[in-house]
Amino acid sequence: MIGRVLADLLHYPYHILVVDDGSTDQTMQAALLYPVTVLHHVTNLGQGAALQTGIRYALSFPETSLIVTFDADGQHHAGDLPRMLETCLEGHYDIVLGSRFMETGQAVNMPVMKRIVLKLAIWFTRVNTGLKLSDTHNGLRVISAEAAQKIQIAQNGMAHASEILAQIADHKMRYCEVPVTISYSAYSLQKGQSILNIINILWDMWIGYMR
Amino acid sequence: MNFNLGQLLFVVILVFLVVYIFLLRTAHSDRLVYLACALAGILLVLAPDLSSDIAHTLGIGRGVDLIIYVFILAGLFYSVTITSELKRLQRQMTSLVRQLALDNPHQGTRSTVESAEQKSGAAPEIGNRSTLEAGPNPQP
């Protein structure tokens, strides 16, 4: 799967960084067949931790101007990137978020339960951060280097998506949404969040507040 | 004073606990707390009416109730302490694993795919170098 995602991304002239979060299934070897950089977590920390590691690495290069986060389970389409990057540069946005629920956005094969939970998450974000977004938990984002400096993902697990949004609100970042397509496959659904995990996520957020 | 078998058993267990605590090489403050608990336990076992008397003065029905309340409080305190300790350990592990990853970037092959894949792409002119990052799959 990582191969297919990378092949898709390699159509575009971006620097690709893969964070292997303690995979035990040869993901790193598979990724290293492509002209990409791979960072390897020796043990599994969670997606939030992996994103933070990747952002830290990207920021270590002074020429980095924009950072894209892109899930490696095949749900995103590299074809959405040029539009997002252009939007970010032209509008001088701090962060551009992908949205599957905007008018021309798409969510292919999305299970009904997933739609309900995501809609709840949108409402929750509105109450929690005041951000009025059409899609709050989309892994596809473009972040400017300056904004990325400010974003500190402390949530190692899946609560990082809400954490990023909270920091957008806290730092009063300029943000916008761009319609993107999300394709659900058996693979991405198996790798993705189960509905029950929302309990874990809310618990993580609560613990995060307590610190 | 007559002691029954149950009391004897509890006292023996608690005395073993006290000895064990003294053999532990933990901080003195921790040892003191454990020791105080064990000694209080021995006292309560040997003088069963004591807990009832304390309970009554505090306005709690039975001695057993008092002990249950104290246990619940102690348990809550313990779980909060453990949670924050776990969080601290997790933060340490995260920075350790992250530093290891950042110090050892692996470079994939530069040739094979690049030539094959890149010529088909309608490479957009963005004018800026972007670092693209693929997050991993969350592990089950």
Image (cartoon, coloured by chain):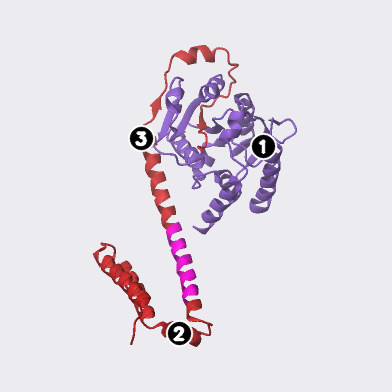
Residue B21 at x, y = what percent?
28, 66
What residue would you read off at disc 2?
A: B54
The total number of labels drawn is 3
Residue with the most extreme left position: B23
Residue B100 at x, y = what percent?
36, 37
Disc 2 residue crowd, few under 14, some 14–19, many 20+, Cα 10 Å: some
Task: Write the residue at 36% across / 77% down.
Answer: B7
- Residue nearest the observer in this picture, A143 or A186: A186
What residue would you read off at disc 3?
A: B103
Q: Is residue A75 visible?
A: no
- Residue nearest the observer in this picture, A97 or A8: A8
Q: Colour of chain A?
A: purple
Circle nearer the N terminus (3, 2): 2
What are the residue bounds of the magenta stretch? Answer: B67-83
Q: Colour of chain B?
A: red
Disc 3 marks which amino acid? Asp
Is B93 on the left-hand or right-hand side of A173?
A: left
Distance from the alpha carbon under mark 3 to that under mark 2: 61 Å
The circle on residue A177 is 1
Distance from the alpha carbon under mark 1 to that under mark 3: 34 Å
Disc 1 with disc 3 on a shared chain? no
